Image (cartoon, helix red, strand yellow):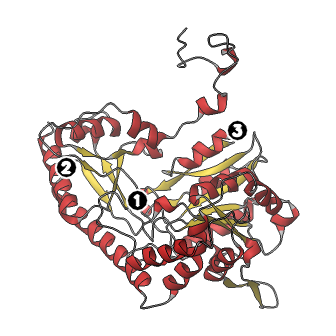
Amino acid sequence: NKVGMAGVEAEDMKRVDGWRIHASRRSLATVNPIRNFVQGAEMVPHPEKSTIRLDVGDPCVYGNLRVDNSVVEQLVEIARSSENNGYTLSNGRMDARQAVAEYFSLELVSGSDDGGVRNNKLNKEDVLLFVGASGALEAAIGAMCNEGDNILVPRPGFPLFQTLAEGMGVECRFYDLDPRRGWEIDLEGVEKLVDDRTAAWVINNPSNPCGSCFSREHLERIVSKAENVRVPIIADEIYHGMVFSATEFVPLASVNQTVPMLVIGGISKQFVVPGWRLGWILIYDVEERFRAAEVRRGLQQLSTRMLLPCSLIQALLPWLLQERRTPGTAVSAAVQSLMSDLEQNADLVNQCLATARGIRCIPPQGAMYMMLELDCAALCVTDDIDFTRKLYASESVYVLPGSCFGASNFVRIVITPDAPRLEEACRRIVAFTLARK
């Protein structure tokens, strides 16, 4: 017998050809809006135009952005040594965790009455390594939330927050980012979302999908609000330091003295190695509230049930971070070159789409993305999904509808392709908008 899965509740799946087999409710309820759209959308490109994909947040797609060769050579030497082929500790190699701790260590003004300085330097016990920043996010949410709790997530925002949380029975409550104010958070709206089951506030800075970066003053207001509502923060800073020349990146922990905070990071974006899958959690907890609530213990125990990051990449990490923070090294220069290329690409898109009808570019300040606001009436489309389908059918340019991120009537594009390809994509987008009547 052939049994279709669609629309069938897991508890009703008693038998398949007599076998005690069924899909779990958790698996069938898992939804990732980006992957579902990209993998499930039945869209056909123009048959005579080559496809240009501006949808995939992978800097390696077109080959113009690459990890520096010195990194590859170092990794080859590590592999040849045959000294790093075994398992590591569940929370990561000690030398790798210490390297991360030293790289991100901070000394913060305590704000105490005596005006002293509170030492908030990290040590290896404040760092856990995971399989990518996504694995770190899953562990952070899993360590802080029970089924029935809720977390605060940005809108627009990276949909994996919702995918991971709802898979654990955790409700997502969405706070708004204001495109007219550089995608700053509506902080008054945040306070209205908090109740006794609010377990964490997720902050993503720099932002995917917006490409925005919060000012120091806005970060200080975020921390103040978290202190007022007594909600710990999960700070997704996978794009740590990836900002353009006119923008200052301020780590959230650097303006924080008392709010318990888990900071998510990794090597995937700035080193152009998303497939190497190494991320981390940094625990900032001066007041020891995470320890008292056993969140530290929970993270450690969760690390024992997850896959470890590749031992070779862990072994590379101390060298990689040392090279990154040392001026004049090939690694440091490569990151600077990457950000210069991305900034030039962002400027190129702004210039090329200036003549488009019904599209407003919102200039990014960093990361790898740009949001385009649509005037659907002027474009004769019903919404951002309709725009995406018709653009692809007419011009073979693939963008992501903002609905994937909770932003209707926007689309997100990546700014990672080489300049000629990006310019051609923009030319086609302009032609499409001008032809819409």
Q: Is residue 198 above or below residue 129?
A: above
Could you tell whether 116 is left or right of 368 in the image?
A: right
Secondary structure beneath label 1: helix
* Percent of width and height locating residue 40: 40, 33
Q: Local crowd at mark 1 within 10 Å, few (<14), some, or many (≥20)?
A: few
At 52% across and 68% down in the image, what residue appears?
A: 267
Q: Local crowd at mark 3 within 10 Å, few (<14), some, or many (≥20)?
A: some
- Which residue in the structure is indicated by mark 3? 169
At 56% across and 68% down in the image, what residue appears?
A: 313
Could you tell whether 421 is left or right of 63 in the image?
A: left
In-front residue for pair 397/214: 397
Three-letter amino acid code at disc 3? Gly
Q: Quadrant of the N terminus?
A: top right
Earlier residue among tags 1 and 3: 3
* Percent of width and height locating residue 366: 41, 69
In-front residue for pair 124/148: 124
Q: Is residue 68 visible?
A: yes
* Percent of width and height locating residue 342: 33, 69
- Which residue in the structure is indicated by mark 2? 429
Secondary structure beneath label 2: helix
Three-letter amino acid code at disc 1? Arg
In-front residue for pair 239/300: 300
Three-letter amino acid code at disc 2? Ile
- Which residue in the structure is indicated by mark 1? 180
Q: CA distance from mark 2 to mark 3?
A: 40 Å
Earlier residue among tags 2 and 3: 3
Q: Residue furthest right?
A: 292
